[in-house]
Image (tube, grey):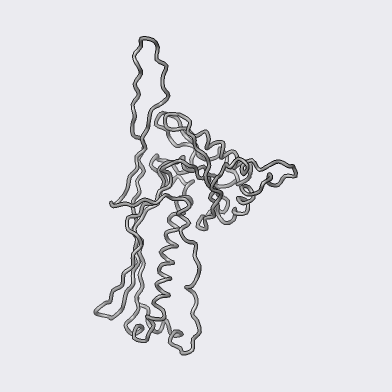
Amino acid sequence: MAINRSQLAKELEPGLNALFGMEYDRYENEHAEIFETESSDRAFEEETLIVGFGNAKVKGEGNAVEFDSASEGFTSRYSHETVALAFALTEEAIEDNLYDRLGARYTKALARSMAHTKQVKAASVLNNAFSSSFTGGDGVALVSTAHPLAGGGTLSNRPSTYSDLNETSLEDALINISTFTDDKDMILALQGKKLIVPPQLQFVADRLLQTPGRVSTSDNDINSIKNMGMVPEGYTVNHFLTDNDAWFLMTDCPDGFKHFERSALSTSMEGDFDTGNVRFKARERYSFGWSNPRAVFASQGA
């Protein structure tokens, strides 16, 4: 339905000083703190885990060397979604100069809607991280105690018992990350990189990572997490997280969180011959997801 003059009666009144309701600041590109962006030229993208070799074996004198074989593990698929929104102005509204006065504002509102939707979709990867209804390529949720390994056994990227964000839980997370193994049970040199928290935990995160001394103690102990540089990129607040006590510690594992851009944000405008309405449209196409569960260690709070 086109926006007509009756919907914008106040805009036609002479001497009107200002209109408000669309000129807000917005949280932009918070997904860039989490996801690595790559371009795509197809309907979907797939990433397949390559399983390498295990530990080398001792070769006895005169014996044949033992051979190992590489293989493929699970495959993660990124199916792109088309996201679009439009609005229209009537021919009469344009004649009465509403295009010049309101066209730019509604275009900004359109961009705001598109940006907000993108952040919601990006954050949904973390908001659904603990749900068995949203599984990855390995068949389990992003945060799980049962990520299957090609060589047998499982990998856990969460505490055995969910815990709130505090000094002990963060230290335990850092220790767990440092003992992550690959699919052949070889230890990986991974470390925590960045803490992702909702607004409700930003003050806790700041105290844990920025204060020189231990938090909430009367001792003269140093803050080992800060002193050892254990979370080098600090913390970031994501305003689109829906669980106010869930926290996520990103690691430096490659090929973790991915954002594929199939079609960048574009806008178009056209007139309708029959009605004289002018229509404005914004459109983009993208996907968000994860490939390697070692990219994060997380808890949904106690």
| Residue found at the very far bottom of the displayed protein | 14
**Where 138 falls versus 114 (above or below)?**
above
Q: Quadrant of the N terminus?
A: bottom left
Horizontal and vertical percent for residue 127?
48, 51
The residue that appears at 33% across and 81% down in the rendered structure is 90
The residue that appears at 34% across and 21% down in the rendered structure is 67
**Where 297 falls versus 24 (above or below)?**
above
Q: How many marks?
A: 0
| Residue found at the very far left of the displayed protein | 273
Horizontal and vertical percent for residue 40?
31, 51
**Where 96 falls versus 69 (above or below)?**
below
The residue that appears at 37% across and 30% down in the rendered structure is 52
| Residue found at the very far top of the displayed protein | 62
Horizontal and vertical percent for residue 124?
45, 53
**Where 73 falls versus 90 (above or below)?**
above
Q: Dividing the picture into quarters, in which one does residue 253 lie?
A: top left
Left or right for 123, reference 222: left
Horizontal and vertical percent for residue 58?
42, 16
Left or right for 169, reference 149: right
Left or right for 278, reference 143: left
Nearest the viewer among 183 and 139 is: 183
Q: Dividing the picture into quarters, in which one does residue 49 lie?
A: top left
